Amino acid sequence: MKNKIYILGIESSCDETSVAIVTRDKNNQPQILSNIIKSQIEVHKLFGGVVPELAARAHSDVIDVLVMQAIKKAKIKLSDISAVAATTGPGLLGGLLVGVVAAKTLSSILKIPFIAVNHLEGHALSAQLEKDISFPYLLLLVSGGHTEFTVVHKFNHYERIGTTVDDALGEAFDKTARLLKLGYPGGPQIEKLAKNGNENKYELPLPLIHEKNSYFSFSGLKSSVGQLVQKQKRLTPTIKKDIAASFQKTIGEILSVKTKFAMSQFQKLTKETEVNVVVAGGVAANQYLKNILCNLDTPYPNQVYFPSMKLCTDNGAMIAYAGLLRFEKKIFSKLNIKPRPRWPLDDKAIFAKGKGLR
């Protein structure tokens, strides 16, 4: 098996610990041999959000076991691994340290390359694990820590054209769910509740909707939901459903307008006649928003791709795949590299304050 490349990928940037093995099949297409994911939802749901210290401890408790499980499921030996890739940023420092230290340790013991991977690059390339999507394409990354539009010109060439000026979209979902006294994580809870609500019951603001750019703002929307909740004499189940549905509809309208504008920017930058869009990150699992983005009314041909559920959320497979591409180009990392809690995918992008801009 030594002639074949096997990349072990480690993801530990937030509240999922994941280890995966990725290689190429006989047709030279990427192949996931294993993708073990350990969620920390039970650890954090009592607090209504991720507690960094608890997250780091939870990563540390399971990382060794997950490495062995991933190798066993892939039906290879530890000595078959060609390189170890790990999320080195952006993310929570404690969690990043756990994954990076584990990867560096394996690299040193096995005398194989260590590959530092940007978490956002993993998401940017994740759809290629399941579909043959050619460059360039437009990435809409929507998660708990990130919300941005990036032109993926080719591997290792990324150009951010829009982001959030405050909260990330996933964070807005979680905060709104907390206002409605729902469980954690908030996204699935709001989506479930909204199915039986009246989405036209409440009119909520559409921040930056008339701005001719691809930037987002969600903090004001969340504040408006808070004011709406305070006005209610009693937060009945029906009111909760209507607020959830109205909130979700508003998010859909914002994403629709901003995505269409970003697609026009993409076309101007790349001169492509067809605009392919990849939507990645945890919020991409929302079926209501997925339906809206798959049915955009645009003046040019387009295709919108969504990774499967297991690849939408944080996972080791996307990190292993990014590591595979780097390995093939002999882009390795030194063992003295440090985790970067803030690490933009496009280092030339204009810095803007706010969460989700890492």
Image: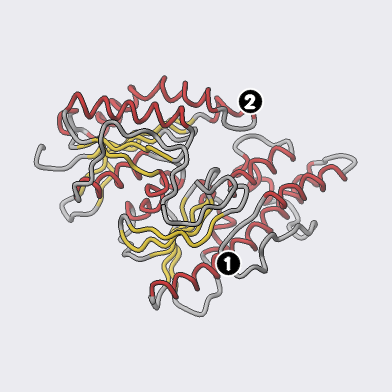
Q: Position of residue 255 (x, y in %)?
A: 59, 61
Q: Nearer the viewer, residue 205 or 182?
A: 205
Image vertical order of residue 150 relative to residue 113, above or below: below
Q: Residues within 10 Å of mark 2 (few under 14, many from 20)?
A: few
Residue at left offset 41%, top offset 19%:
61
Per the rendering, the mark at residue 164 is none
Rendered residue at 59%/56% (across/down): 288
Q: Secondary structure at mark 1?
A: loop
Q: Which residue is mark 2?
A: 46
- The picture places residue 60, in percent across and down from the top left corner, at 41, 22
- The Cα–Cα distance between marks 1 and 2, rounded to whole angstroms, is 38 Å
What secondary structure is found at the residue carrying circle 2? helix
> Which of 182/265 is in front?
265
Q: Quadrant of residue 339?
A: top left
Quarter of the N terminus within the rendering:
top left
Q: Position of residue 194 (x, y in %)?
A: 69, 50
What residue does disc 1 label? 213
Q: Inspect the image, locate mark 2, and give the three-letter code of the amino acid beneath it.
A: Leu
How many dots with numbers?
A: 2
Report the residue at 49% width, 46% height from top.
358
Q: Is residue 73 left or right of residue 143?
A: left
Q: Nearer the viewer, residue 351 or 82?
A: 351
* Circle nearer the viewer, 1 or 2: 1
Q: Dot 1: few (<14), some (14–19), or many (≥20) neighbours within 10 Å?
A: some
